[in-house]
Every structure is written in C-alpha cells, then in structure tokens.
Image (spheres, grey):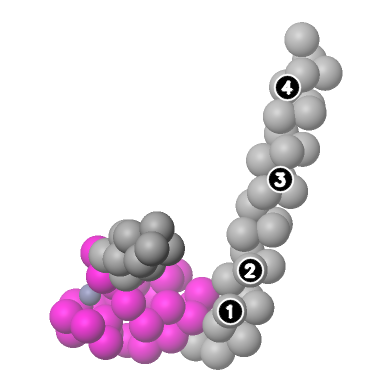
C-alpha cells in the first residue's frame, strides 16, 4: 500500500519536474509580460515569472487551437 503511494508520488514528482523543465526550455528563463499580449488582462506575478505572455484564459485558448490544428 505505502509502496504504491510512494511510486505514485515519485511519478508525480518526475512529471512536475519534466513540465517545469519544458517551461524553462520554452521560455528561456526570460520574464513574461505584465499584461496579456492578447487581451491586456493583468498576468499574476507567479505566472509572469514563469515567462508567460498570455493570461490563463488566452493560454488555454491557444492550447485549444493548437490541439485542434494538430488533428489535421
Ligand atoms: Zn489574455
């Protein structure tokens, strides 16, 4: 039981590390913008520090469009 939980935690840890590594790679450690480049909403500092230039809404929209195009 405990072993299974440990394995799950290890898995989550490695997934998170992988995801963060991907973000750093994509954004090259540069800070994001203070406001969303799409809708000019303010971007939270935590999100900005990850190098985002889009608010959550616009980022989701972009992701959705990307996955739609990926089907063609
Ligand atoms: Zn936006």
Residues at circles 2 and 1 in contact by the CB criterion of under 8 Å: yes
**Which residue does the numbered mark 1 point to in the structure image?**
26
Q: Nearer the viewer, mark 1 or mark 4?
A: 1
Does residue 15 belong to the magenta stretch? no
**Which residue does the numbered mark 4 point to in the structure image?**
5
Label 3 or label 4, whichever comes before in sequence order: 4
**Which residue does the numbered mark 2 point to in the structure image?**
22
Span of residues in magenta:
32-59
State the image coordinates of residue 5 (x, y, percent, origin top left): 73, 22
Q: Quadrant of ligand 1?
A: bottom left
Q: Nearer the viewer, mark 3 or mark 2?
A: 2
**At 37% across and 88% down in the image, what residue appears?**
33
**At 44% across and 70% down in the image, what residue appears?**
46
- Circle 4: element type: helix
Q: CA distance from mark 3 to mark 1?
A: 20 Å
Query: In the rendered image, which quarter contains the C terminus?
Result: bottom left
Q: Is mark 3 within 8 Å of ligand 1?
A: no
Q: Is mark 2 within 8 Å of ligand 1?
A: no
State the image coordinates of residue 29 (x, y, percent, origin top left): 61, 85
**At 78% across and 28% down in the image, what residue appears?**
7
Q: CA distance from mark 2 to mark 1?
A: 6 Å
Residue furthest out toward the right: 3
């Amino acid at each position: 039981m405990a072993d299974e939980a440990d394995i799950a935690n290890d898995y989550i840890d490695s997934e998170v590390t992988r995801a963060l590594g991907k973000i750093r790679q994509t954004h090259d450690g540069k800070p994001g913008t203070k406001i969303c480049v799409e809708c000019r909403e303010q971007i939270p500092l935590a999100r900005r520090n990850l190098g985002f230039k889009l608010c959550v809404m616009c980022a989701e929209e972009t992701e959705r469009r990307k996955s739609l195009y990926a089907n063609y």
